[in-house]
Image (cartoon, grey):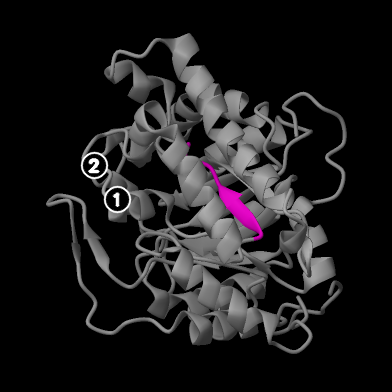
Protein backbone atom coordinates (compact mmCIF):
# COMPACT_ATOMS: atom_id res chain seq x y z
CA UNK A 1 0.00 0.00 0.00
CA UNK A 2 1.37 3.41 -0.88
CA UNK A 3 0.30 7.00 -1.18
CA UNK A 4 1.66 7.70 -4.64
CA UNK A 5 1.40 4.18 -6.08
CA UNK A 6 -0.37 3.06 -9.20
CA UNK A 7 -3.64 1.15 -9.44
CA UNK A 8 -4.89 -0.21 -6.13
CA UNK A 9 -5.27 -3.77 -7.28
CA UNK A 10 -7.64 -6.08 -5.44
CA UNK A 11 -9.39 -4.97 -2.29
CA UNK A 12 -7.52 -6.98 0.40
CA UNK A 13 -10.75 -7.66 2.29
CA UNK A 14 -12.36 -9.19 -0.79
CA UNK A 15 -9.73 -11.93 -0.73
CA UNK A 16 -10.80 -12.92 2.78
CA UNK A 17 -14.48 -12.98 1.87
CA UNK A 18 -13.91 -14.93 -1.33
CA UNK A 19 -11.89 -17.62 0.39
CA UNK A 20 -13.48 -17.73 3.85
CA UNK A 21 -16.99 -16.38 3.28
CA UNK A 22 -16.43 -13.92 6.15
CA UNK A 23 -13.59 -12.42 8.14
CA UNK A 24 -13.09 -11.72 11.83
CA UNK A 25 -11.80 -8.39 13.11
CA UNK A 26 -10.00 -7.95 16.41
CA UNK A 27 -11.39 -6.32 19.55
CA UNK A 28 -10.56 -3.24 21.60
CA UNK A 29 -6.79 -2.82 21.73
CA UNK A 30 -6.72 0.02 24.24
CA UNK A 31 -9.32 -1.39 26.60
CA UNK A 32 -7.59 -4.78 26.50
CA UNK A 33 -4.35 -3.07 27.52
CA UNK A 34 -6.26 -1.29 30.27
CA UNK A 35 -7.67 -4.60 31.50
CA UNK A 36 -4.09 -5.85 31.75
CA UNK A 37 -3.11 -3.07 34.11
CA UNK A 38 -1.82 -0.32 31.84
CA UNK A 39 -2.77 3.23 32.80
CA UNK A 40 -4.39 4.90 29.81
CA UNK A 41 -5.56 8.03 31.63
CA UNK A 42 -3.72 10.18 29.15
CA UNK A 43 -4.70 12.22 26.07
CA UNK A 44 -2.58 9.81 24.01
CA UNK A 45 -4.57 6.79 25.27
CA UNK A 46 -3.11 3.63 23.65
CA UNK A 47 -0.42 5.75 21.97
CA UNK A 48 1.00 6.20 25.47
CA UNK A 49 1.71 2.46 25.58
CA UNK A 50 3.25 2.77 22.12
CA UNK A 51 5.71 5.20 23.69
CA UNK A 52 6.38 3.27 26.88
CA UNK A 53 5.55 -0.44 26.42
CA UNK A 54 5.48 -1.40 22.72
CA UNK A 55 5.98 -5.08 23.54
CA UNK A 56 2.59 -5.10 25.29
CA UNK A 57 0.90 -3.91 22.10
CA UNK A 58 2.58 -6.64 20.08
CA UNK A 59 1.34 -9.23 22.57
CA UNK A 60 -2.27 -8.00 22.42
CA UNK A 61 -2.15 -8.16 18.62
CA UNK A 62 -0.85 -11.72 18.85
CA UNK A 63 -3.54 -12.69 21.36
CA UNK A 64 -6.28 -11.44 19.03
CA UNK A 65 -4.77 -13.35 16.12
CA UNK A 66 -4.61 -16.53 18.16
CA UNK A 67 -8.24 -15.99 19.18
CA UNK A 68 -9.25 -16.00 15.51
CA UNK A 69 -8.89 -12.48 14.12
CA UNK A 70 -8.21 -12.26 10.38
CA UNK A 71 -7.36 -8.56 10.62
CA UNK A 72 -5.73 -6.60 13.43
CA UNK A 73 -5.87 -2.81 13.82
CA UNK A 74 -2.80 -0.86 14.88
CA UNK A 75 -2.23 1.34 17.95
CA UNK A 76 -2.34 4.55 15.90
CA UNK A 77 -5.97 5.49 16.63
CA UNK A 78 -4.98 8.40 18.86
CA UNK A 79 -1.49 8.92 17.43
CA UNK A 80 -1.08 12.32 15.80
CA UNK A 81 1.80 14.73 15.36
CA UNK A 82 -0.07 17.29 17.47
CA UNK A 83 -0.80 14.81 20.24
CA UNK A 84 2.80 13.70 20.53
CA UNK A 85 3.95 17.32 20.41
CA UNK A 86 1.90 17.96 23.55
CA UNK A 87 4.02 15.30 25.23
CA UNK A 88 7.26 16.90 24.12
CA UNK A 89 7.86 14.48 21.25
CA UNK A 90 9.31 16.07 18.12
CA UNK A 91 7.78 15.65 14.69
CA UNK A 92 10.39 13.21 13.38
CA UNK A 93 10.13 10.97 16.45
CA UNK A 94 6.32 11.17 16.35
CA UNK A 95 6.32 10.03 12.73
CA UNK A 96 8.64 7.16 13.66
CA UNK A 97 6.26 6.14 16.46
CA UNK A 98 3.32 6.05 14.07
CA UNK A 99 5.33 3.87 11.71
CA UNK A 100 6.29 1.74 14.69
CA UNK A 101 2.61 1.12 15.45
CA UNK A 102 2.31 -0.54 12.05
CA UNK A 103 5.57 -2.45 12.49
CA UNK A 104 4.27 -3.93 15.75
CA UNK A 105 1.20 -5.22 13.95
CA UNK A 106 3.30 -6.66 11.14
CA UNK A 107 5.66 -8.31 13.62
CA UNK A 108 2.75 -9.91 15.47
CA UNK A 109 1.19 -11.09 12.21
CA UNK A 110 4.48 -12.57 10.99
CA UNK A 111 5.13 -14.31 14.31
CA UNK A 112 1.64 -15.79 14.22
CA UNK A 113 1.96 -16.91 10.62
CA UNK A 114 5.37 -18.50 11.18
CA UNK A 115 3.71 -21.28 13.20
CA UNK A 116 2.45 -24.05 10.87
CA UNK A 117 -0.51 -24.83 13.15
CA UNK A 118 -1.80 -21.28 12.69
CA UNK A 119 -2.06 -21.74 8.92
CA UNK A 120 -4.56 -24.58 9.12
CA UNK A 121 -7.87 -23.35 7.72
CA UNK A 122 -6.71 -19.73 7.85
CA UNK A 123 -5.50 -17.10 5.42
CA UNK A 124 -2.58 -14.81 6.17
CA UNK A 125 -4.09 -12.09 8.39
CA UNK A 126 -4.20 -8.44 7.42
CA UNK A 127 -2.89 -5.41 9.30
CA UNK A 128 -4.99 -2.23 9.16
CA UNK A 129 -3.48 1.09 10.26
CA UNK A 130 -5.97 2.90 12.47
CA UNK A 131 -6.96 6.48 11.68
CA UNK A 132 -9.07 7.73 14.56
CA UNK A 133 -11.25 10.86 14.48
CA UNK A 134 -10.20 14.41 15.31
CA UNK A 135 -12.11 14.09 18.58
CA UNK A 136 -9.77 11.31 19.71
CA UNK A 137 -6.89 13.79 19.57
CA UNK A 138 -8.92 16.36 21.51
CA UNK A 139 -9.69 13.73 24.19
CA UNK A 140 -12.66 15.80 25.36
CA UNK A 141 -15.49 13.42 24.50
CA UNK A 142 -16.20 15.02 21.11
CA UNK A 143 -15.35 11.78 19.30
CA UNK A 144 -18.73 10.63 20.65
CA UNK A 145 -20.61 13.75 19.52
CA UNK A 146 -18.89 15.06 16.39
CA UNK A 147 -19.21 18.56 17.88
CA UNK A 148 -15.99 20.00 16.49
CA UNK A 149 -14.36 23.39 16.16
CA UNK A 150 -13.22 22.58 12.60
CA UNK A 151 -15.08 22.32 9.32
CA UNK A 152 -14.31 19.83 6.54
CA UNK A 153 -11.32 21.83 5.32
CA UNK A 154 -9.89 22.02 8.82
CA UNK A 155 -10.38 18.29 9.32
CA UNK A 156 -8.70 17.56 6.00
CA UNK A 157 -5.69 19.64 7.08
CA UNK A 158 -5.58 17.91 10.47
CA UNK A 159 -5.62 14.37 9.08
CA UNK A 160 -3.34 14.88 6.08
CA UNK A 161 0.11 14.62 7.80
CA UNK A 162 -0.56 11.36 9.62
CA UNK A 163 -2.49 9.96 6.66
CA UNK A 164 0.66 10.33 4.57
CA UNK A 165 2.76 8.64 7.27
CA UNK A 166 0.42 5.71 7.84
CA UNK A 167 -0.35 5.14 4.16
CA UNK A 168 3.36 4.61 3.53
CA UNK A 169 4.05 2.52 6.65
CA UNK A 170 3.44 -0.93 5.15
CA UNK A 171 -0.04 -1.87 6.41
CA UNK A 172 -2.43 -3.70 4.10
CA UNK A 173 -5.01 -0.93 4.35
CA UNK A 174 -6.14 1.95 6.58
CA UNK A 175 -8.97 1.72 9.10
CA UNK A 176 -10.76 5.07 9.35
CA UNK A 177 -12.87 4.34 12.39
CA UNK A 178 -15.19 5.73 15.07
CA UNK A 179 -16.09 8.54 12.68
CA UNK A 180 -18.73 10.69 14.39
CA UNK A 181 -19.56 13.13 11.61
CA UNK A 182 -20.20 13.27 7.89
CA UNK A 183 -17.82 16.24 7.30
CA UNK A 184 -14.97 14.25 8.83
CA UNK A 185 -15.76 11.26 6.62
CA UNK A 186 -15.75 13.52 3.56
CA UNK A 187 -12.35 14.91 4.56
CA UNK A 188 -10.91 11.41 4.84
CA UNK A 189 -12.51 10.31 1.57
CA UNK A 190 -10.76 13.21 -0.14
CA UNK A 191 -7.44 11.98 1.22
CA UNK A 192 -8.24 8.46 0.06
CA UNK A 193 -9.05 9.62 -3.46
CA UNK A 194 -5.70 11.44 -3.51
CA UNK A 195 -3.94 8.17 -2.60
CA UNK A 196 -4.26 5.88 -5.64
CA UNK A 197 -2.26 3.04 -4.09
CA UNK A 198 -4.26 2.92 -0.86
CA UNK A 199 -7.34 1.04 0.36
CA UNK A 200 -9.24 2.09 3.48
CA UNK A 201 -12.39 1.16 5.31
CA UNK A 202 -14.73 3.79 6.70
CA UNK A 203 -16.50 2.97 9.95
CA UNK A 204 -18.93 5.21 11.80
CA UNK A 205 -19.90 5.60 15.42
CA UNK A 206 -23.69 5.92 15.67
CA UNK A 207 -25.89 7.28 18.43
CA UNK A 208 -28.96 5.24 17.51
CA UNK A 209 -30.25 2.98 14.77
CA UNK A 210 -30.36 5.67 12.09
CA UNK A 211 -27.93 8.50 12.81
CA UNK A 212 -24.21 9.11 13.13
CA UNK A 213 -23.12 10.84 16.35
CA UNK A 214 -23.43 14.36 14.93
CA UNK A 215 -27.01 13.70 13.82
CA UNK A 216 -26.25 13.00 10.16
CA UNK A 217 -28.26 10.18 8.63
CA UNK A 218 -26.21 7.00 8.53
CA UNK A 219 -27.51 6.22 5.04
CA UNK A 220 -26.12 9.55 3.82
CA UNK A 221 -22.73 8.71 5.30
CA UNK A 222 -22.77 5.32 3.58
CA UNK A 223 -23.76 6.93 0.26
CA UNK A 224 -20.77 9.27 0.50
CA UNK A 225 -18.48 6.27 0.96
CA UNK A 226 -20.17 4.34 -1.84
CA UNK A 227 -19.36 7.13 -4.28
CA UNK A 228 -15.63 7.20 -3.46
CA UNK A 229 -12.79 5.16 -4.93
CA UNK A 230 -10.64 3.00 -2.68
CA UNK A 231 -13.25 2.25 0.00
CA UNK A 232 -12.61 -1.37 0.99
CA UNK A 233 -15.64 -1.57 3.29
CA UNK A 234 -18.14 0.54 5.20
CA UNK A 235 -18.93 -0.21 8.80
CA UNK A 236 -20.21 0.61 12.24
CA UNK A 237 -18.06 0.53 15.36
CA UNK A 238 -17.93 1.98 18.86
CA UNK A 239 -21.72 1.72 18.90
CA UNK A 240 -24.21 -0.11 21.11
CA UNK A 241 -24.71 -3.71 19.92
CA UNK A 242 -28.49 -3.30 19.92
CA UNK A 243 -28.29 -0.87 16.97
CA UNK A 244 -26.04 -2.94 14.73
CA UNK A 245 -28.54 -5.11 12.82
CA UNK A 246 -30.70 -2.12 11.90
CA UNK A 247 -27.72 -0.06 10.80
CA UNK A 248 -26.45 -2.90 8.63
CA UNK A 249 -29.85 -3.11 6.99
CA UNK A 250 -29.80 0.62 6.31
CA UNK A 251 -26.33 0.37 4.79
CA UNK A 252 -27.27 -2.55 2.58
CA UNK A 253 -30.13 -0.53 1.08
CA UNK A 254 -27.68 1.99 -0.39
CA UNK A 255 -24.41 0.15 -1.04
CA UNK A 256 -22.97 -3.11 -2.31
CA UNK A 257 -19.69 -2.54 -0.49
CA UNK A 258 -18.49 -5.01 2.10
CA UNK A 259 -19.97 -4.19 5.50
CA UNK A 260 -18.26 -4.28 8.89
CA UNK A 261 -19.72 -4.57 12.38
CA UNK A 262 -17.50 -4.14 15.43
CA UNK A 263 -19.49 -2.60 18.25
CA UNK A 264 -18.65 -2.00 21.88
CA UNK A 265 -19.35 -4.55 24.59
CA UNK A 266 -22.66 -2.92 25.46
CA UNK A 267 -21.28 -0.72 28.21
CA UNK A 268 -21.41 3.05 27.75
CA UNK A 269 -18.43 5.41 27.97
CA UNK A 270 -18.95 8.66 29.86
CA UNK A 271 -16.46 10.97 28.15
CA UNK A 272 -16.74 13.68 30.78
CA UNK A 273 -16.28 11.40 33.80
CA UNK A 274 -14.06 8.95 31.88
CA UNK A 275 -15.75 5.85 33.25
CA UNK A 276 -17.69 2.92 31.78
CA UNK A 277 -21.26 2.37 32.88
CA UNK A 278 -22.04 -1.31 33.14
CA UNK A 279 -24.63 -3.08 31.01
CA UNK A 280 -26.39 -5.64 33.20
CA UNK A 281 -26.95 -7.96 30.22
CA UNK A 282 -23.81 -9.68 28.96
CA UNK A 283 -23.69 -9.98 25.17
CA UNK A 284 -23.59 -13.46 23.64
CA UNK A 285 -20.90 -12.76 21.06
CA UNK A 286 -21.43 -15.98 19.14
CA UNK A 287 -25.16 -15.40 18.69
CA UNK A 288 -24.61 -11.72 17.93
CA UNK A 289 -22.06 -12.54 15.23
CA UNK A 290 -24.53 -14.83 13.50
CA UNK A 291 -27.24 -12.16 13.65
CA UNK A 292 -24.97 -9.50 12.16
CA UNK A 293 -23.75 -11.80 9.43
CA UNK A 294 -27.36 -12.55 8.52
CA UNK A 295 -27.95 -8.78 8.42
CA UNK A 296 -25.19 -8.40 5.84
CA UNK A 297 -21.87 -7.98 7.66
CA UNK A 298 -18.86 -9.58 6.00
CA UNK A 299 -16.41 -8.56 8.73
CA UNK A 300 -17.30 -8.89 12.41
CA UNK A 301 -15.34 -8.04 15.53
CA UNK A 302 -15.48 -5.73 18.52
CA UNK A 303 -14.43 -2.35 19.79
CA UNK A 304 -14.24 -1.00 23.34
CA UNK A 305 -14.20 -3.57 26.16
CA UNK A 306 -14.15 -6.49 23.73
CA UNK A 307 -11.27 -8.86 24.43
CA UNK A 308 -9.65 -11.90 22.81
CA UNK A 309 -12.08 -14.28 24.52
CA UNK A 310 -15.02 -12.50 22.87
CA UNK A 311 -13.31 -12.61 19.48
CA UNK A 312 -12.76 -16.32 19.98
CA UNK A 313 -16.52 -16.75 20.39
CA UNK A 314 -17.13 -14.78 17.19
CA UNK A 315 -14.68 -16.98 15.30
CA UNK A 316 -16.17 -20.16 16.69
CA UNK A 317 -19.71 -19.21 15.74
CA UNK A 318 -18.89 -18.03 12.22
CA UNK A 319 -16.71 -21.05 11.50
CA UNK A 320 -19.72 -23.33 11.98
CA UNK A 321 -22.06 -21.45 9.68
CA UNK A 322 -23.46 -22.48 6.31
CA UNK A 323 -22.23 -20.80 3.11
CA UNK A 324 -22.21 -17.02 3.47
CA UNK A 325 -25.14 -14.79 2.75
CA UNK A 326 -24.96 -13.00 -0.56
CA UNK A 327 -23.93 -9.37 -0.67
CA UNK A 328 -27.06 -8.17 -2.49
CA UNK A 329 -28.80 -5.08 -1.32
CA UNK A 330 -32.54 -4.86 -1.09
CA UNK A 331 -33.89 -2.67 -3.88
CA UNK A 332 -35.37 0.65 -2.92
CA UNK A 333 -39.04 1.05 -3.82
CA UNK A 334 -39.40 1.62 -7.54
CA UNK A 335 -35.71 1.03 -8.17
CA UNK A 336 -34.41 -1.50 -10.66
CA UNK A 337 -31.51 -3.63 -9.52
CA UNK A 338 -28.49 -3.61 -11.76
CA UNK A 339 -25.77 -5.01 -9.50
CA UNK A 340 -25.37 -7.97 -7.16
Which comes before the other along the chain, label 2 or label 1?
1
The answer to whether residue 125 is seen in the rendering is yes
Write down the quadrant of residue 242 in the picture: bottom left
Provide residue 34's location: percent of width, then percent of height.
Answer: 29, 50
Q: Quadrant of the C terminus?
A: bottom right
Circle 1 packing at 10 Å, graded few (<14), some (14-19), many (20+), is some
Magenta part of the protein: which range? 70-76
Q: Residue at x 54, y 46 (%)?
A: 176
Residue 75 inside the magenta-drawn segment: yes
For this rendering, which residue is in front, 165 or 126? 126
Residue 146 seen in the figure: no
Inter-mark Cα distance, 2 to 1: 6 Å
Residue at image coords 74%, 29%? 2
| Left or right side of 193 for 279 | left
Residue placed at 77% from the left, 74% from the top? 21
- Please give the label number shown on residue 106: none
| Mark 2 Cα-neighbour bin, 10 Å: few <14, some 14–19, many ≥20 | some
Looking at the rendered structure, the secondary structure element under dot 1 is: helix
Q: Is residue 115 above or below residue 317?
A: above
Give the percent coordinates (x, y) of residue 330: 70, 82
Of residues 5 and 253, the one drawn nearer to the viewer in this rendering: 5
Tags 2 and 1 in contact by the CB under 8 Å rule?
yes
- Compared with residue 120, is residue 174 higher up or lower down, i.e. above or below? above
Question: Which circle marks residue 39 in the picture?
Answer: 2
Residue found at the very far front of the displayed protein: 116
Image quadrant occupied by the N terminus = top right
Q: Which residue is mark 1?
A: 34
- In x, y percent, where is residue 132? 45, 42
As helix, strand or loop, the secondary structure at mark 2 comes to loop
Amino acid sequence: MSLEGGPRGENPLERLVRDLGFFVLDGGLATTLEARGFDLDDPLWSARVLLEHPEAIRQVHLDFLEAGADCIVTASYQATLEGFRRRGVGEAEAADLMRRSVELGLEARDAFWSEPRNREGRLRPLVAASVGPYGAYLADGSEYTGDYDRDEEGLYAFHRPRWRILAEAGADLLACETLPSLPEARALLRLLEESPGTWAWMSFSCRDGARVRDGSRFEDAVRACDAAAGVAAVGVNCTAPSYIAGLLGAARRVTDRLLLAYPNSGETWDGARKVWSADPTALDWGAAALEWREAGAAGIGGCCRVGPEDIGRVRGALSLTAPPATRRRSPAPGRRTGRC
